[in-house]
Structures are given as structure tokens and as C-alpha cells.
Image (tube, rainbow, N blue to C red):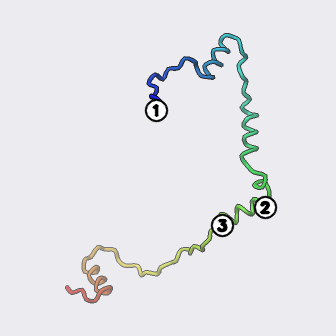
Amino acid sequence: MAEPTKDLKTEQPDDAQQLAEAIDKGEQKAPSVNVDADLAKAKAYSVSDIDRSQEGAQAAEAVTAPQLATPGPVEINQPAEDASGDPDKFRSMAREVNPRISE
């Protein structure tokens, strides 16, 4: 089995370093980048042809449609009680819910 390399410095620099040195020396022309053209090409590839059509929109709608019906809000009719904080009212309410409660 080979011994792991402990010296991480290599004799040859990587390609990016070689390119940077060649550009500095004038041996090679610096690459030019047209960001707007690259962005336009990337946008063209980011959406498939079917997604641009009506068929794709219908397929997306079918896939993302909810599978189960969700119920709407239900109004609960509760009589408005006096929220005075009176302990006797609380006890009487508790007796209505559970008649076994004694004083």
C-alpha cells in the first residue's frame, strides 16, 4: 500500500495559475466573458419546451392540484359570557360540563 502524501505542495502549478501567469507575461490573451449572452443561454435551457406550452401548464396544474378537499372555517356559536373572572361562574360552568364535580 502506498504511503499518503504529506507534502501538499506540488512541482507544477494548476491550470488556472499557468493561465494567469501566461496572461501576465503577454503570452496569451485574456478570455472575454459576455455575461448577458451567457445569462440568455442559461435562461433558454432552464425551461423545457413543454413547460412553455399550454399542455405543460395543464400538466403542472394537474400535478400540483390538492388531492384532498380541505374544509373551510366552521363558525361555532357560543353564547357570549361575561369575562369578569368570577370564580363562582367558573365553578358553575365546570359543573355543567361535569356534574360529578362537587363544591
- Quarter of the view holding residue 39: top right
Q: Position of residue 91 (x, y in %)?
A: 26, 81
User: Which is nearer the eye, 94 or 60?
Assistant: 60
Disc 1 crowd, CA 10 A, few/some/many (<14, 14-19, 20+):
few
Cα separation between marks 1 and 3: 58 Å
Q: Which residue is pictured at 44% across the width and 24% down the height? A: 6
Rendered image quadrant of residue 53: bottom right
Q: Quadrant location of residue 62?
A: bottom right
Mark 1 or 3, nearer chain start: 1
Residue at left offset 52%, top offset 77%: 74
Q: Where 28 falls versus 47 (above or below)?
A: above
Confirm or deny contact between disc 2 and disc 3 (CB under 8 A). Answer: no
Q: Residues within 10 Å of mark 3 (few under 14, many from 20)?
A: few
Mark 2 surroundings: few (<14), some (14-19) or many (≥20) residues within 10 A: few
Which element is circle 2 on?
A: helix
Q: Residue 90 vs residue 9: left or right?
A: left
Q: Which mark is first along the chain, 3 or 2?
A: 2
Residue projecting furthest to the bottom: 99
Name the residue carrying label 1.
Answer: 1
- Which residue does the numbered mark 2 point to in the structure image? 55
Q: Is residue 58 above or below residue 96?
A: above
Q: Amino acid at mark 2?
A: Glu
Q: Are marks 2 and 1 in contact (CB under 8 Å)?
A: no
* Three-letter residue code for mark 3: Ala
Q: Secondary structure at mark 1?
A: loop
Q: Nearer the viewer, mark 2 or mark 1?
A: 1
The quarter of the rendered structure image containing the C terminus is bottom left
Closer to the camera in the image, 100 or 22: 22
- Measure the alpha-carbon separation of dots 2 and 3: 15 Å
- Disc 3 target residue: 65
Q: Is residue 103 left or right of residue 23?
A: left
| Residue type, numbered disc 1 | Met
